[in-house]
Image (cartoon, coloured by chain):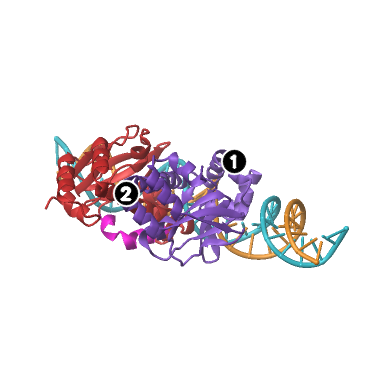
Chain colours: A purple, B red, C orange, D cyan
Amino acid sequence: MHPVLAYTDRIVKLDPPARDELLQAFVRQEFPKGTCLLRAGQVSQHYHFIEQGLVKSSFYKEDKEFIMTFFKETILFTEINSYLTSAPSKYQLLALEPTTVYSIARPDIERLCHRHHAVETLFRQLLAFASVGMMKRISEMLEENATTRYQLFVQEKAPLLQRISLGDLAAYLGITQVSLSRIRAGR
Amino acid sequence: MHPVLAYTDRIVKLDPPARDELLQAFVRQEFPKGTCLLRAGQVSQHYHFIEQGLVKSSFYKEDKEFIMTFFKETILFTEINSYLTSAPSKYQLLALEPTTVYSIARPDIERLCHRHHAVETLFRQLLAFASVGMMKRISEMLEENATTRYQLFVQEKAPLLQRISLGDLAAYLGITQVSLSRIRAGR
DNA sequence: CCAATCTTTTAACAAATGATAAAAAGCTAC
DNA sequence: GTAGCTTTTTATCATTTGTTAAAAGATTGG
């Protein structure tokens, strides 16, 4: 089965016409390591399904980078703020590994959401997943200090830890790389 | 016009049957100051439209309170994590002022989402608003220190500032009340 | 009006994190 | 293999934020 359909099947049951039209709208794309799926300043106009690879969503504030989240294989995602508001994105989407995605453009999504109620349910569910994740993130940033946030990351995302640099982990945790190194050293 | 419909009209166009059925599902409720719309540990099973009043969404970690967000009049909201996952809520919803809401139960929402595509669009849009707000919150917590976060709150939510305690503001910013007092004193 | 309670501020000290610089370790391309 | 580059660690000092305690200020109910 097509990997996109294998993914959507676990979220919502689509009837055959919806499945067909959905698949036709997705386009396969490859992004070499270090290239952008979306540059800051552009408008996010696609959802991307990662077949294989790793992407970071990040932004810069006075030369310092901060990472919103990491997306790895088997997820359907976008830079949701720009997608929803049509405003230029504050964030970039950058491939940390050679990354293969299937992308679907916003007009196709809107058309399919309108034609097939279940497709709207699918994208509504994606928003729900994003909301749950972001609420967890906000809670952790409020209640936990950097040491605990690091330990939680190690516990909950051990496989990902092997694929990202400590600099990127620090940018995700919201601390400097030097501070993360200190935390890891146990001081 | 009913305040709920005045609100939904600005988000999505509902046809008359959808409007009627939606209104029939909403129930008016009053919550005195200091009472909970949702207690921590309960499952969030309703959306609430605030006609008048103010609610905080907060949780406790070892006697320390942290505030996720404030909801004031003219918003349709819920504790979204528990609502989506059906897990007991980590968060409480507590009325900071005498609060009047119109509430709609989850089975009614699901029924209406299924019957009327536009109602699903409405609730999808609510998720979208929540996502945009949470992304902004995460960005700010990553890139700004407590002093700047305080200043941003004062700038962007000046009216709300008059209605909440500085203790609650500190709990929202993720700092101690003592630290907020220091920031306000300009040291 | 006043006692009781809650909120906010102030002060002193401790702990966590940032900034900067330099060294060490790891990786890459030739 | 090694020079050059990037990543990570270490060290030092500055700044921010937390902790605790106490005082000052505001609010509430009788």
Query: Residue A172 at what x, y percent from top left?
Result: 53, 52
Query: Residue A25 at what x, y percent from top left?
Result: 44, 55
Disc 1 residue type (three-letter): Ala
Q: Identify the image quadrant of the C terminus of chain A.
A: top right
The image quadrant of residue A16 is: top left
Residue at 62%, 51% (x, y): give it.
A166
Q: Is residue A170 left or right of residue B111?
A: right
Verify whether residue B33 appears in magenta.
no
Report the residue that reaches farthest toward the left: B1
Residue at 46%, 59% (x, y): give it.
B144
Secondary structure of the residue carrying tag 1 is: helix
Q: Residues within 10 Å of mark 2 (few under 14, many from 20)?
A: many
The residue tagged 2 is B124
Residue at 38%, 63% (x, y): give it.
A86
**Closer to the camera, A80 or A31?**
A31
Q: Which mark is residue A158?
A: 1
Q: Would you place residue B43 above or below residue B156 in this image?
A: above
Q: Is residue A50 left or right of residue B33?
A: right
Residue B91 appears in the rendering: no
